[in-house]
Image (cartoon, helix red, strand yellow):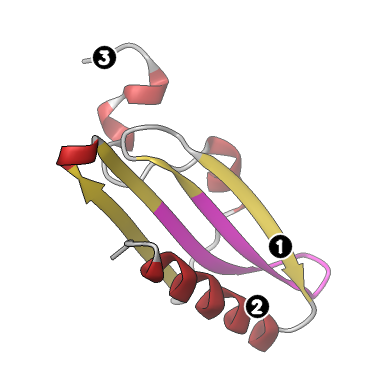
Amino acid sequence: MNRFAATDSSFSLVGRSRLCQLFRMDTPSEIVLTSIDPSRNRARFYVLSIQPTLFGEHALMRQWGRIGTLGRCRLDLHATAEAARQAMNRLAAAKRRRGYE
């Protein structure tokens, strides 16, 4: 087993930062995209999910990075779930145009 957390096998499929895991709640609205191209040494992931906040807003959680690493996390706050869902679909469409599946 590798002793480095960034390449530990527990993060091999979809790496997520520990900070994002602390704030994560169960939700049916999640999109997981990957972009794998061995000829270009490319193996990336992009995860979009909507999470409720403690203040009644909705956060669009964006997680991305190289598969096998912890990656990065960003939260975008939206006033309504519908606004967050529209932003999630817009970002997913942009990532699919760039080759993510």
Left or right: where 32 falls relative to 24: left
- The answer to whether residue 65 is magenta is no
Q: Residue furthest bottom?
A: 82
Q: Which residue is mark 3?
A: 2
Which class describes the residues within 10 Å of circle 2: few (<14), some (14-19), or many (20+)? many
* Distance Cα–Cα, label 2 vs label 1: 8 Å
Q: Residue furthest right?
A: 55
**CB under 8 Å between discs 2 and 3:** no
Q: Given the image, on which type of amino acid does mark 3 rest?
A: Asn
By secondary structure, the bulk of the magenta-drawn segment is best described as strand
Q: Is residue 53 above or below residue 86?
A: above
Residue at image location 45% in from the left, 76% down from the top: 93
Q: Position of residue 83 (x, y in %)?
A: 69, 84
Q: Given the image, on which type of amino acid does mark 2 rest?
A: Ala
Q: Nearer the viewer, mark 2 or mark 3?
A: 2
Q: Nearer the viewer, mark 3 or mark 1?
A: 1
Q: Given the image, on which type of amino acid does mark 1 rest?
A: Asp
Residue at image location 35% in from the left, 61% down from the top: 33
Q: Position of residue 63 (x, y in %)?
A: 51, 51
* Distance Cα–Cα, label 2 vs label 3: 38 Å
Residue 76: mark in rendering? 1
Please tell me which residue lies in front, 15 or 67.
67
Which class describes the residues within 10 Å of circle 1: few (<14), some (14-19), or many (20+)? few
Q: Which residues are magenta?
A: 46-63
Disc 1 on helix, strand or loop? strand
Residue 84: mark in rendering? 2
